[in-house]
C-alpha cells in the first residue's frame, strides 16, 4: 500500500520563500517525436545489482544523468534527451507486501495534492487504464512562460513499485506522441538472460558540462524537490560563471535563486545567505535576491536584517526581470509568520504591500 512506501520528493511540503525560476535548454527545431523515434536501439533495463524484477523502457537517444541505488534502497535512473530537452526518471521501490494498482492510485493522488501539481493547469488523473497516470502543465513561473508538461506514471508487480516521470519545457501538442510512445514501452519484468543497455558499450570519460547544462540538470532535480542532489550542479555552474560567464542575466538570476533556495530548503542557511549576498553584490538592484535574503534571515530568526532586506526588496520592485509577476506577498510566506505578531514588522509588511498594490494600479 502507499502508506508503506517511501514518499518521493515531489510530494514534499515546500516551506520558505518564492519558488525559483526553472530554466532548461530549449528544444531544437526538430520535433520531439522525430528526434527520438525511428532507432533500433535496445531498451534500457533498470533493476538492482542482484537482478530480479526490473523495468524495461525505451530511452533511445537519451543520456543517463544519474544511475544509482539510493541509500534508502530505491533504484533510481534519470536520463535526458539533448535534442529535445525531455527528461525521464525511473524509481523502483521494494515494499514488504504485495504491490498493487490501488497503491499506485493512492501514490498519484498524494502527488496530485503536492505543491508542484497544485500550481499547475490541465491536471488530469487517469486511473482506469493499464498504467495509472497523472499529468499537468505549468504554463508560467513568476510570470515567465514555461509550458512545462509533466506526466507521472506508476506500475506495480510482486513487491515492486515503479514510478516514472516525464517532463519537458516548451511543450506543445506536437510533443504528445513521444510522451505516449515512451509510456507504451515500459514493462515490469524479470531480468533478461543477457543484460541490455546496462552500460555504454565503449566506456569513455564524460565530457565536462557547461554552466547551462549544469543548470538544466540541476533544475530537473530541483523540480522533484531533490534539493540536496541539485546543489552540487548549481554550485558548479555558479563557479563556472564566476570564472567565465556564459548565461544571460535572466538565467544567471535563476541560477542564484535556485542555488540559494536549495541551500535554504536543506537547512544550510549560512550558505543560502552567502549565495544571495553574492548575487546582490553583482546585481544590487534585483529585488528577488533581497526578498529571498529576507526570507533567509527570517529562517535564522534575525528580525532586524530580515526587515532591512525586505524593505530593500520592495524599494527595487520595479527592477524585476521582464515578464516576472508582481512582487510576492510577504504575508503569505511561512518564513515571516514568526514575525507577524510583532506590531512593527506587521505594520511594515502592510505598508509595503499597500505600496505594491498602489504601484500596480498606476
Image (cartoon, helix red, strand yellow):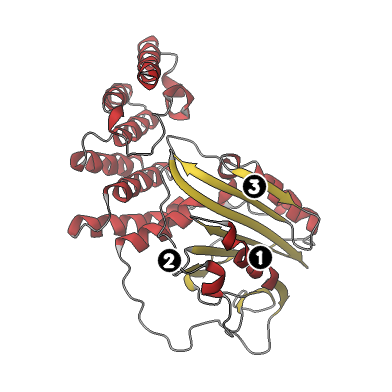
Residue at disc 2, secondary structure: loop
Characterize the local packing of mark 2: few (<14), some (14-19) or many (20 or more) Cα atoms within 10 angstroms. few
For disc 1, the marked residue is: 180
Instruction: Tell me residue 26's x, y (percent).
Output: 42, 59
Characterize the local packing of mark 3: few (<14), some (14-19) or many (20 or more) Cα atoms within 10 angstroms. many
Tell me which residue sits at (45%, 51%) in the image: 227
Q: Can residue 70 be seen in this view?
A: no
Disc 1 to disc 3, C-alpha distance: 20 Å
Please name which of the two marks, 1 or 3, marks the residue nearer to the observer: 1
Disc 3 to disc 2, C-alpha distance: 31 Å
Residue at disc 1, secondary structure: helix
- Residue 267 lies, with reference to residue 47, above or below; the image says above
Please name which of the two marks, 1 or 2, marks the residue nearer to the observer: 2
Q: Do the residues labelled 1 and 3 touch (CB within 8 Å)?
A: no
Tell me which residue sits at (30%, 39%) in the image: 273
- Residue 61 lies, with reference to residue 4, above or below; the image says below
Q: Is residue 166 visible?
A: yes
Instruction: Tell me residue 338's x, y (percent).
Output: 44, 22
Q: In which quarter of the image is the C terminus?
A: top left
Upstream in sequence: badge 1 or badge 3: 3
Q: Which of 257 and 229 is in front in this view?
A: 257
For disc 3, the marked residue is: 111
Instruction: Tell me residue 230's x, y (percent).
Output: 42, 55
Upstream in sequence: badge 1 or badge 2: 2
Name which quarter of the figure residue 336 lies in: top left
Amino acid at each position: 500500500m502507499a502508506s508503506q512506501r517511501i514518499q518521493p520528493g515531489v510530494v514534499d511540503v515546500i516551506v520558505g520563500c518564492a519558488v525559483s525560476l526553472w530554466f532548461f535548454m530549449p528544444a531544437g527545431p526538430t520535433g520531439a517525436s522525430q528526434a527520438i523515434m525511428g532507432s533500433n536501439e535496445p531498451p534500457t533495463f533498470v533493476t538492482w545489482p542482484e537482478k530480479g524484477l526490473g523495468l524495461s523502457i525505451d530511452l533511445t537517444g537519451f543520456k543517463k544523468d544519474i544511475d544509482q541505488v539510493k541509500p534508502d534502497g530505491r533504484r533510481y535512473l534519470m536520463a535526458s534527451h539533448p535534442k529535445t530537452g525531455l527528461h525521464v526518471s525511473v524509481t523502483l521501490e521494494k515494499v514488504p507486501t504485495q504491490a498493487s494498482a490501488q497503491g499506485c492510485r493512492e501514490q498519484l493522488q498524494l502527488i496530485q495534492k503536492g505543491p508542484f501539481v497544485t500550481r499547475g493547469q490541465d491536471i488530469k488523473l487517469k486511473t482506469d487504464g493499464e498504467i495509472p497516470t497523472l499529468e499537468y502543465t505549468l504554463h508560467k513561473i513568476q510570470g515567465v512562460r514555461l509550458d512545462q508538461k509533466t506526466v507521472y506514471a506508476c506500475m506495480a508487480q510482486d513487491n515492486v513499485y515503479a514510478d516514472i516521470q516525464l517532463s519537458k519545457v516548451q511543450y506543445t501538442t506536437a510533443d504528445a506522441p513521444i510522451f505516449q510512445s515512451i509510456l507504451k514501452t515500459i514493462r515490469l519484468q524479470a531480468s533478461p538472460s543477457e543484460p541490455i543497455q546496462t552500460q555504454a558499450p565503449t566506456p569513455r570519460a564524460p565530457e565536462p558540462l557547461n554552466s547551462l547544462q549544469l543548470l538544466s540538470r540541476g533544475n530537473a532535480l530541483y523540480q522533484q524537490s531533490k534539493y540536496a542532489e541539485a546543489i552540487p550542479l548549481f554550485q558548479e555552474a555558479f563557479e563556472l560563471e564566476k570564472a567565465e560567464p556564459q548565461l544571460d542575466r535572466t538565467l544567471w538570476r535563476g541560477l542564484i535563486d535556485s542555488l540559494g533556495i536549495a541551500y535554504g530548503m536543506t537547512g544550510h542557511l549560512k550558505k543560502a545567505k552567502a549565495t544571495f549576498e553574492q548575487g546582490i553584490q553583482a546585481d544590487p538592484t534585483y529585488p528577488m535576491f533581497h526578498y529571498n535574503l529576507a526570507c533567509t534571515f527570517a529562517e535564522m530568526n534575525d528580525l532586524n536584517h530580515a526587515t532591512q532586506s525586505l524593505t530593500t526588496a520592495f524599494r527595487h520592485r520595479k527592477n524585476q526581470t521582464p515578464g516576472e509577476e508582481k512582487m510576492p506577498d510577504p504575508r503569505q510566506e511561512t518564513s515571516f509568520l514568526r514575525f507577524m505578531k510583532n506590531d512593527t514588522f506587521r505594520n511594515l509588511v502592510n505598508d509595503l504591500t499597500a505600496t505594491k498594490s498602489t504601484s500596480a494600479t498606476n
